[in-house]
Amino acid sequence: MISTQTMNTFKTIVGEENVITSSAGRLVYSYDATPNFQSMPDAVIAPRNTEEVSQIVTVCREQKIPIVPRGSGTNLAAGTVPSEGGIVLLFKHMNHILEIDEENLTVTVQPGVVTLDMIKAVEQKGLFYPPDPSSMKISTIGGNINENSGGLRGLKYGVTRDYVMALQAVLPNGDIIRTGGKLAKDVAGYDLTRLLVGSEGTLAIITEATLKLIPMPETKQTMLALYNSMDAAAKSVSEIIAAKIIPATLEFLDRPTLIAVEDFAQIGLPTDVEAVLLIEQDGPPEIVARDMEKMAEICTREQAVSVQIAATEAEALALTTARRAALSALARLKPTTILEDATVPRSEIVNMVKAINEIAEKHNVRIATFGHAGDGNLHPTCPTDARDHDEMERVEAAFADIFSKAIELGGTITGEHGVGMMKAPYLEWKMGPEGIAIMKAIKHSFDPDNIMNPGKMFAKETRKRVVVTQ
């Protein structure tokens, strides 16, 4: 518990109206979008500027109070659950776009800016911010940076870290630092900017970010390819990349996901095929036309039963919107939905999807799979019910098998959702004990008192490795 005196100090720093201590008020911030993880904070504080964040952190370090920075709570690995109490930091006041620099092609924002709001603002200037997490309507830039979020356009354009040029951050001792800058080249010292991106709030609190922009693509087209064979769809992905074509989007949905999405979106998606590839290309009109023609030829050659290019921008938008709604669609099926995130080399997508289906059958659970086929990032999703304890144990065992198989195939336990609490017990499977040791050393050098989002990334004990035999 935080003492009354300390709580009064926080109120002096940010104003009484920006400190929440009531049970009902704190309850809202005791969980995020991850099922079955919840823990009450002692208080919720909304600072108004970087200096106030620094003062709050200084008090927390003196009192050894845990701090959890939080955006919109869309985290899917329990990374923003205050597992050890303490305070949750909200950035509802620090939600401004500070500058759009058209000369240097950058945008500088505070962490509470909603991703889609920023994307729309820069597009009005004819500029483009490619990272597009499916949660972009509500997720914030601070959360995207902490999790190194990806999105549908990751194959061609990369993920959040590829666009973070500079950061302002508050260290666990209260110091304020700036890293990077509006520079095309900068190799002075360790790359602290990249270190902080994806650190999940365990090293510092980001209070400002300068992001790289690129010119808006001149045009784009969208294609839907239908398959009666999962193998054929995956082979098409490999052949497209082998043909030296890098689409802006190359998404995969299996039949269970298709059925759920069509029931939800009602846009006329086929539900009698085994797999769908959603492909988008952008750029100069002549290049887009050439690439779409080549990709259509490849899909047809690889036994697609239908290849259709969206006739209008509205039709194309409906297709991509439906794909972004996959989680929402699947969430309607059962009271609890567990969306996971495993990545394998593109060449192993067929084997991974087969393994997911076999694992689901082995544990008698239902798993639908969709994701970013172009970069090997799959999202096996299990509609279940947290009240059914037997089924939840089988679900957990199934996902342990999935993570194990992904690593066996040369992949990883998370491509864009982060580690948080949910995947912390599996991190050593990927990193090995030596990797965990060096990460812990970095954490300790930044945060010797372990006040920054404690309980995340590093599990108290690692799960026993499960070897999947097919």
Image (cartoon, rainbow, N blue to C red):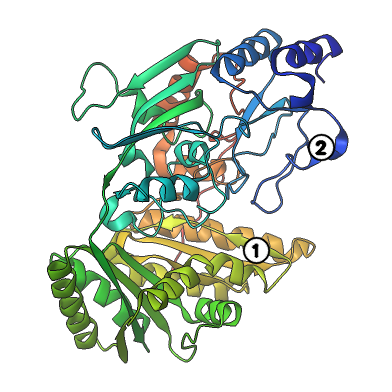
Residue behind mark 2: 25
The answer to whether residue 62 is left or right of residue 420 is right
- Give the x, y percent position of residue 43: 77, 27
Q: Can residue 415 be seen at all in this image of the molecule? A: no
- Give percent across and percent down for residue 299: 24, 82
Image quarter for residue 280? Answer: bottom left
Disc 1 from disc 2: Cα separation: 25 Å
Q: Nearer the viewer, residue 410 or 233?
A: 233
Q: Nearer the viewer, residue 173 or 449?
A: 173
- Amino acid under label 2? Gly
In the rendered image of this protein, does residue 46 appear above or below residue 397?
above
Q: Is residue 146 above or below residue 73?
A: above
Residue positioned 17% across, 83% down in the render: 297
Q: Quadrant of the C terminus?
A: bottom left
Quadrant showing the N terminus:
top right
Kind of element beneath mark 2: helix
